[in-house]
């Protein structure tokens, strides 16, 4: 029997939430016996991870910008050449923007294509980038599905729509043996450790986190604040702005600045609470990771974070930008002296966001597509 082949298109060379979710997904698809090829627009942190995990990948830039016709056809030919040698059964684009050029390749090679919507997109972008309709649109949350279909109602009838939550391996986020090792390394003693994990962009709400920290430190010096992330802007202007705010608030001595970290699970093991103060999150992967680590999670009441936390045993939703409310809830959690890890949170996250249920949905979807055609508009 022929091994099914899936070609994936990554939306970036950086390790953001979308690519972390993609990597978790392809790992499990590969374990099911499928052959995998991943297209990446450039070398970067993500390709380093792919190399480390022995995934086959090719660098072909799908970012066309203000492109000429000749540039478009050149890259189209590059994709066609690479894909013809691989001969995939399905193309799976990890977002709308890397879907555009792949959709033309799919039409030429007569291969079914999936567009994975992980982020909110404007109607004009949908009209431009989705000229060729996919076989299926996968959404990473019901929030994203409803948002997309409300803005683009024609797609509710013309294209198959499915929700498949981001893939999580529960074992990756449960490292209790690392807790004391890291806390000793950071010299935090018995301090209450509050963490924030996210790339440095205004959307992630670092300002709210830091103002919350200042508020908490006024009531007690027994808090420490961990910051994990990376500035994807080459100028590092976001990182610089965050560090300036830390200095202006005079809280440098209470901040543990870790920068980019590959192993999020280990970091989570050392925390007492995870804070996700995002202004907006289409899904909110890090909130699930916090639940899987057995942490209480305090997050903004926005986007997919509501879907993740509203039924979590120790999940707390706060009005975004309200650093006073964030501080009050974190202080209350500290006063309750909860013991790490919270098994109820972990079990809830495994049952709802664990691999098996979502992998079953994805495999069923792939099986239904192999051998089918697609539509053109």
Image: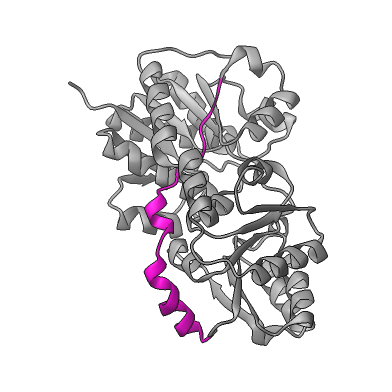
In this rendered view, identify the residue nearer to me: 255 or 331. Answer: 331
| Total number of numbered discs in the rendering | 0
Q: Which residue is located at x 48 percent, y 58 percent?
A: 293
Q: Is residue 312 visible?
A: yes
In this rendered view, identify the residue nearer to me: 150 or 93. Answer: 150
Residue 169 shown in magenta = yes
Bounds of the magenta segment: 161-187
Q: Is residue 350 above or below residue 135?
A: below
Viewport quadrant of the C terminus: top right
Farthest residue to the front: give it.
Answer: 336
In this rendered view, identify the residue nearer to me: 71 or 270. Answer: 270
Q: Is residue 36 above or below residue 3?
A: below
Q: Is residue 30 above or below residue 317?
A: above
Farthest residue to the left: give it.
Answer: 1
Q: Which residue is located at x 74 percent, y 80 percent?
A: 217
Q: Is residue 41 visible?
A: no
């Amino acid at each position: 029997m022929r091994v099914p082949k899936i070609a994936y298109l990554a939306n970036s060379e950086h390790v953001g939430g979308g690519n972390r979710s993609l990597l978790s997904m392809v790992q499990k698809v590969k374990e099911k016996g499928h052959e995998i090829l991943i297209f990446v627009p450039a070398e970067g942190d993500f390709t380093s991870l792919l190399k480390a995990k022995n995934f086959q990948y090719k660098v072909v830039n799908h970012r066309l910008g203000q492109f000429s016709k000749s540039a478009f056809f050149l890259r189209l030919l590059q994709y066609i050449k690479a894909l013809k040698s691989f001969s995939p059964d399905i193309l799976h684009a990890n977002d709308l923007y890397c879907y555009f050029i792949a959709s033309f390749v799919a039409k030429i090679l007569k291969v079914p294509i999936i567009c994975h919507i992980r982020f909110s997109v404007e109607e004009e972008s949908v009209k431009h980038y989705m000229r060729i309709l996919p076989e299926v649109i996968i959404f990473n949350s019901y929030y994203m599905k409803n948002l997309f279909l409300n803005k683009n109602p024609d797609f509710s009838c013309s294209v198959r729509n499915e929700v498949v939550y981001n893939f999580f391996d529960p074992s990756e986020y449960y490292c209790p043996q690392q807790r004391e090792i890291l806390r000793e390394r950071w010299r935090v003693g018995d301090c209450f450790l509050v963490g924030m994990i996210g790339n440095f962009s205004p959307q992630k709400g670092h300002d709210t986190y830091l103002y919350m920290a200042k508020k908490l430190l006024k009531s007690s010096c027994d808090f420490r604040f961990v910051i994990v992330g990376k500035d994807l802007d080459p100028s590092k202007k976001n990182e610089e702005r965050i560090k300036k705010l830390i200095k202006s608030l005079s809280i440098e001595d209470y901040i543990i600045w870790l920068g980019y970290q590959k192993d999020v699970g280990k970091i989570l093991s050392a925390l007492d609470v995870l804070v996700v103060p995002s202004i907006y999150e289409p899904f909110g992967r890090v909130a699930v990771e916090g639940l899987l680590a057995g942490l209480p999670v305090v997050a903004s009441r926005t986007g997919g974070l509501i879907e993740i936390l509203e039924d979590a045993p120790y999940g707390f939703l706060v009005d975004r930008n309200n650093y006073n409310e964030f501080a009050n809830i974190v202080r209350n959690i500290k006063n309750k002296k909860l013991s790490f890890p919270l098994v109820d949170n972990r079990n809830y996250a495994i049952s709802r966001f664990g691999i098996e249920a979502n992998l079953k949905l994805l495999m069923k979807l792939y099986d239904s597509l192999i051998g089918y055609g697609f539509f053109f508009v």
